[in-house]
Each structure stands twice: as structure tokens, then as C-alpha cells.
Image (cartoon, coloured by chain):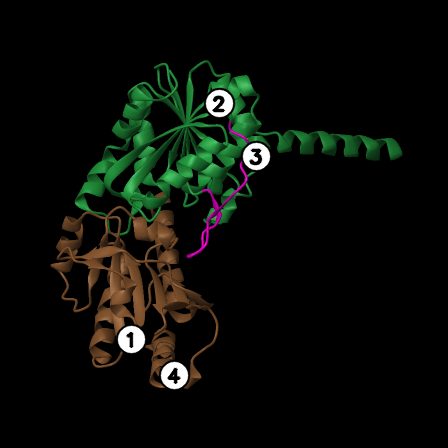
Amino acid sequence: MAMNFLALMWALMLWTGSARASLPDYQTFPGDGPRLLLWVNAERGRAEPELEAARKLAAQGTTVWSLDLVGAYFLPQLPSSMDAVPVQDMVDWLDAALTAGKPATVYAVSRAAVPVLRAASRLEAPRRHRLCVLLMYPNLYASAEALADADYLDVGRLDGLRIRVLQPRRSAATPWLPAQLDHLSGLGATVSHAILENLREGYWARETPTEFEIAESRRMDALLLRELETWGCK
Amino acid sequence: MQVRTWRGWWAATLLACAQVQAAGLETRAPVPAPALQAVDLQGTPRTLDDYRGRVVLLNFWAAWCPPCRREMPSMERLRQKMQGRPLEIVAVDSAEPIEDVKAFLATMTLGFPILLDPEGVNTRRWKVYALPTTFLLDGEGRIRYVLKGGAEWDEGEALQAIEGLLSEIDKPASRVSGGT
């Protein structure tokens, strides 16, 4: 009886350990080309134009792993939910991508930048140097109150990580982009950026999108492909 | 399904804005306001000295920002309601080309000054991270209230706060101490 109980406990520990180290649930869009894009959706979840862009990228040869963190971990659609994502799962996911045989670029939107950067920070340095990270209007603030300096969340050191920030022009964060780039550089990352003119944050899923935003939503694959070809890991 | 999820998120955001309208006005210990160095639509330089001795509602906004546009009519109604009283409403457009500002103003008649901050210099100096953000300054140029998010400025808690600051000008002896 005691032996059975111990065996049960041992099995439970093994199961718990494997669950802790499991990969997050993600969708794969296989492409036959040489690139892998890890697409991490914002805290608002995955939107149809993003799925459509992933399909188009796959059709053009880029394999896409699409990860909706709020769906994968049953989290509320809040920025703070991203802080609750198990970082080790993300590390394992990035490791799996880096061993998949294709150069990997992560594309993370808004607050999803936080678990991605934390995981990148925990990678062994040679693996981190092989990774490229595209951040769409990253929200890295712990607090940002008027009249006070912003506090950034701790994501760890990012030495050798290549980061490119995509910043829609029509955003309250745009005037703060230089400060954010300085912050990432200070953590050791190699940083560049691109301003997306005439667009707002989350332009692919706005309640009242402009004609231009609707058109750009349909061209999201082209935007990402351009970034992958001109900047991403080759 | 996912589209519906996003719509739900935007709806929740709007609801959050509505809640801000009811209870978001944050009282601050009186502190001197940072410098404001902007130009109006005619290119004339403006600073807070231009409004010295008056209560100032200083609103940071952008034409692309739906809650900013939504609260503008209430600011205009407030201006009309307060004519002849020492209140100045000043709207600082944050980091936008003047063409975008003029295109918006063509859709709405506003009688208060619009200032331009095309490079976001004032936005950074006042440490504005969200739009709209509004500061209420007392007659001595000190920040007394901050609101992140939109409001109906001509009613409720917002109007009460403004009336409170105006009463300090009407009755100098009752001014709140603090700051410099």
C-alpha cells in the first residue's frame, strides 16, 4: 500500500515536472522556405487579420508558429496577464525554434514583448545571439504615470540580442520611442526601429479603422516579409 | 471568434474610459507646472505665462485618438458655460503633423486655443504616456488635478473640481497652501 502511494507520488512529480517544462500550445503554418517566424499575439488575443497574414506568409515560404498566450494559458485579456506567462515554457519554445533548422525571428506584439524578452534573456548566450526579435509597439512599463519617470519591468540582460521595434506613428508611445530604445540598448541589445506611418496601435483590429488601416491589415504579411528580408535573421 | 474577442476588448476599453469619466480625476499635491513652450495654429509662441492668474485646463490630445475627439465637445461646452470667468482651456496636440490637426478641426468648431507640439517635446516634459491626459492648474500655475483618459468636462466631478479652483481665485484668502 505504502509502495503504491510512493509510486503514485513519484508519477505525480514526474508529470508535474514535465508539465512545467511543456511547450505552450501554438498553431503551426508550415512553409517550404528557409525562414521561421514565431508570432506572439498581444494580450488582446489573436485576431483574424493576423491569422490571415500567417497563412499568406506560409504560402510564400515562411513557416509561422503562432502563439496566443491568453488562449494558451486561459488568461484574462489584460497587459498584466503577460507577466504571468511561465517564462520557462517560453524558453523551451524558443529553444525548440532554434533547433528547428531554420533561422528564427520572434515577432511579439504589445505586452507580449515582456515574456519573449524574459525568455530570450534566459537563453544561453550563443543561442540568444542567433535570435532576432521584432517588437510591435512593445509595452515594457511597470508603471507610467503623468509627471513621473516611467518604470520598466525587469526582463533581464539582453546582451547580443538583435531587436527591431516597429512603432505605429499614431500612438502615445511614439514620443517615448527614443527612451525605450535607450532602455533596450542599456540591457545589452542591438536595437533598431521603424516608424509605421499613418497607423495606430492594433490597427488590424480597431473598432473604427481608417481605410488605410484596413488596407495595411491586409498587407501585414508584406510588412513582416519586408522586415524578415531586410533585417531578420538570415 | 477571434474578431469577436478583439471587439470585446475594445468594448472593455471603452467601458474603462467611461469609468474614468466617473472617478478618474486624480488630486495632486500642488506642484509647479513644467514649462510649456508650444505654438498656436498661427505660429505664435505660447507659454503658461500667457494664462497667468487663471485656472487652466491643459489637455494633451491627438486627432487620431477616439477618446480625445469624444471629449472635445464637452470642453467647448465648458468654455461657453464659463465665458467671463477666469478659466482657460488649452489643448496641446501631441506629436502630429499640423495637416492632421487642421483636418480634424475642419470637422468641429472649437473656440479654445489649440497648441502644437509636433516633436512631442512638451509631451515628454510633462511625462504624458497616454492620450488624452488632462491637467487642471490653479490660478498660481500649480498642478492640482490629473486625468488620464476622457471626461465630460462640463458636468459632474470634473466641473466640481474646476469650480473649486475658480472659487480659490474668487476668494484668495481660501487658497490651498503648498508648492511654490
Q: Is residue A65 magenta?
A: no
Q: CA distance from mark 4 to mark 3?
A: 57 Å
Give the residue number, with chain letter if any, for mark 1. Answer: B154
On residue A87, the disc is: 3
Q: Is residue A172 above or below residue A182?
A: below
- The chain that hosts pointer 4 is B
Tell me, yes or no, whether dots 1 and 3 are on the same chain: no
Mark nearest the camera among 1 and 3 is 1
Magenta stretch, main secondary structure, is loop
Please determine whether, in this image, residue A96 is positioned above or below residue A20. Answer: above
Label 4 residue SS: helix
Select label 4 or label 3 by which is in front: 4
Chain at tag 3: A
**Looking at the colours in the rendered structure, which chain would you say is drawn in brown?**
B
Q: Helix, strand or loop at disc 1?
A: loop
Instruction: Find residue B151 and report its horizontal and vertical position in percent.
Output: 33, 67
C-alpha distance separating marks 2 and 4 = 60 Å
Comparing A123 with A57, the one in front is A123
| Closer to us: B31 or A179 | B31
Rounded to the nearest whole Å, what is the CA distance between mark 4 and mark 1?
Answer: 24 Å
- Say which amino acid is labelled 4: Pro
Residue drawn at 43 percent across, 69 percent down: B23
Type of amino acid at the residue the image marks with label 3 = Val
- Residue A165's spot in the image, x, y percent? 36, 33
Mark 4 or mark 1, which has the lower sequence index? 1
